[in-house]
Amino acid sequence: MKTLRLPLHRVHRIVRPLAAAAALASLLAATPLRAAGPAEFEGADLKLGERLIKQHQCEACHVRRVGGDGSAIYRPSGRISRPAALLTMVEVCSTELNLQLFPEDVAAVAAVLQRDHYRFK
């Protein structure tokens, strides 16, 4: 088998872009997915919100309260009509159920609900 011998300057031409791409991919993978939309949800960690919704079984509670698949709870007579009201409602749930969510947890959960159900502008 023959050994391929490249001059060092050619090796650097190949290796440097690969190393830069690997570093960028690593940085992007380590950066949490952030919410877009209204300012109230800016910087909210969507992955955290998804995890908290699953951990605290929010859908099961909504099914018990409103029946069906529980999604009817997301638009109760227009009560939640703006981002601040959504944040307040998530805080109310946290308090009622003694979840002891931190403000960034409340924002993360609300951001997921914003993305999946409310879609405020």
Image (cartoon, grey):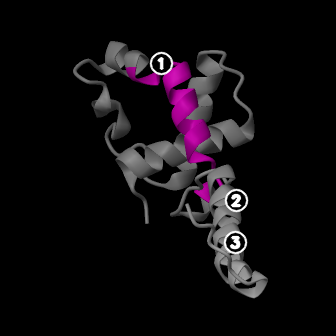
* First reached walking from the N terminus: tag 3 or tag 2: 3
Amino acid at circle 3: Ala
**Residue under circle 3?**
20
The amino acid pointed to by label 2 is Leu
Quarter of the image where one finds residue 4:
bottom right
- For residue 80: magenta? no
Q: Nearer the viewer, mark 2 or mark 1?
A: 2
Residue tagged by mark 1?
57
Q: Is residue 18 visible?
A: yes
- Tally the marks: 3
Marks 3 and 2, how far apart at CA: 11 Å
Find the distance from the CA under tag 1 to the CA under tag 3: 41 Å
Q: Quadrant of residue 18?
A: bottom right
Residue 79 falls in which quadrant of the image? top left
Amino acid of disc 1: Gln
Can residue 88 be seen here?
no
Residue placed under numbered mark 2 in the picture? 27
20 left or right, relative to 121:
right
Identify the image quadrant of the N terminus: bottom right
- Residue at the spot 51% in from the left edge and 28% down from the top edge: 53
**Extreme-right residue of the structure:** 8
Q: Which residue is rendered at x = 34% and y = 36% of the image?
A: 76
Query: How busy is the neighbourhood of tag 1: few (under 14 within 10 Å), some, or many (20 plus)?
Result: few
Query: Which span is picked out in magenta?
Result: 41-59
Describe the element under mark 3 as helix, strand or loop. Answer: helix
